[in-house]
Amino acid sequence: MSSVRVLVGTHKGAFVLTSDAKRKRWDVAGPHFAGWEIYHVKGSPVEPNRLYASQCSGWFGQLIQRSDDGGKTWDAVGNQFSYDGALGTHQWYDGTPHPWEFKRVWHLEPSLTDPDTVYAGVEDAALFRTVDAGKTWHELPGLRQHGSGSRWQPGAGGMGLHTILLDPGNPERIFIAISAAGVFRSDDAGKTWRPTNQGLRSQYIPDPTADVGHCVHRIAMHPSRPDVLFMQKHWDVMRSDDAGESWQEISGNLPSDFGFPIDVHAHEPDTIYVVPIKSDSEHFPPDGKLRVYRSRTGGNEWEALTKGLPQQDCYVNVLREAMAVDSLDSCGVYVGTTGGQVYGSADAGDTWAPIVRDLPAVLSVEVQTLQ
Amino acid sequence: MIRVILPAHLRTLARVNGEVELAAPDLVTVRSVLDALEASYPVLRGTIRDHVTLQRRAFLRFFACGEDLSHEPPDAPLPDAVAKGEEPLLVIGAIAGG
């Protein structure tokens, strides 16, 4: 019997939501790490009961927690994230050089093949990796040092490496995305990197088509088609059909092309989801209506999904890590809001219901489909 | 014996209740007490001071005997009452809402 486990990171702890495949009745466990910011929780695809969590606080810094029993119990593992080699500088908000300074782990991406190997995306932007289940972390310095790093600049939310996509067909290929630097690709397992931002256009940087400087909020791929990428940028929804070599806008008829998350249906590689947000100065849905938008055509043609979502007086946000899909049939879709709701749809977005309504602000949502 | 009082979150992290008691180092200083604390509770490494620079985290303070010792040199001897275990060293988190 299949089941689903939803891993929720919030401003004040982690929660584990579980259901059978019907996805009607949910058990809510938590808070784990009560009072701490949990930026991300994610499980190993090869050993699903192995979970990793990023736990942090302004007082006590960064911790990484590991569970080997699906989130029932946790142990802190290594939390030392030291940049490799010369620190170097990136641009500060005022354009002056600013030395790299570790702040927190935004994203944990377990390897597709080894439960002890995990990639960590951190602020200030860099990529780290553990190969010993989190005991020790080492930077993959080729990203930060590849040449454009001195021109990267934080957005208002900090300069975080927030997305890591591992190509299931090519273990040498990794995509990452940084706010506000853009998308970068490695074809040698993280040793060397180059920007892959051609076709992006951002009016908030001096050269709108520069090779770096774009505030990419999220990228997503379907595992069956890893050369096709979808992007929600700080304005504009984009698509690449050539592994990031070039991007085309697919915002189409969206009511706003600003937003944070983007994800792909588990079984339909051209069905994608976004949550339009009014603007970069008003981080809530247009018209007070929380609407997930779905395109079944790989972009440009979008339909609003509203059944079961609040359609009046709704002024929450859905952050970049806070959308995920399960791989049941039919595909489940999940979004978490800054108002503490986690909404789930067991029918690919046609209808929605709250799984839980009153959590702390949701930072991240991940889903595991368990057999 | 040295007594240390940790903030609630660090007590949870270290899985301790109440005060922590540590064997007294030869010279009782902030540095030697934190060294002993981290040796007994490795999970606290990086949470009170930086792993590498050993600088105190900005939102934490060290109090003892009614004094704020946060800006004393880390190798300065702590008050005798702390060294004798009569008074605890307090690790204090900045007060904040939210």
Image: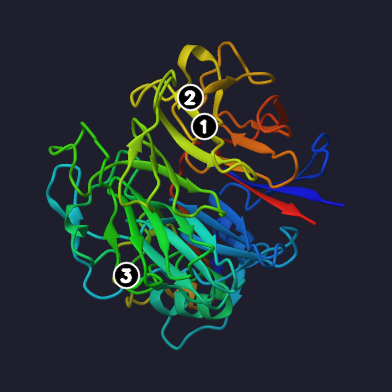
Q: Quadrant of residue A214?
A: top left
Q: Which residue is mark 1?
A: A297
Amino acid type assigned to the residue bearing label 3 in the image = Tyr
Q: Which residue is mark 2?
A: A301
Sooner in the amino-acid sequence: mark 1 or mark 3: 3
Asked whether the residues under marks 3 and 2 belong to the same chain, the reply is yes
At a point 40% along the width and 21% down the height, the residue shown is A256
Asked whether the residues under marks 2 and 1 belong to the same chain, the reply is yes
Confirm whether residue B62 shows in the render.
no
Mark 3: give few (<14), some (14-19) or many (20+) Cα within 10 Å: many
At a point 64% along the width and 35% down the height, the residue shown is A359
Q: Chain of mark 3?
A: A
Q: Disc 1 vs disc 3: which is toward the camera? A: 1
How far apart in space, not on screen, are marks 1 and 3 (Cα)? 42 Å
Task: Answer whether labels 1 and 3 touch (C-beta < 8 Å).
Answer: no
For label 1, the SS is loop
Residue B36 x %, y %: 50, 80
Mark 1: give few (<14), some (14-19) or many (20+) Cα within 10 Å: some
Residue A332 x %, y %: 69, 38
Q: Which residue is mark 3?
A: A83
Q: Quadrant of residue A85?
A: bottom left
Residue A88 x %, y %: 19, 65
Q: Chain of mark 2?
A: A
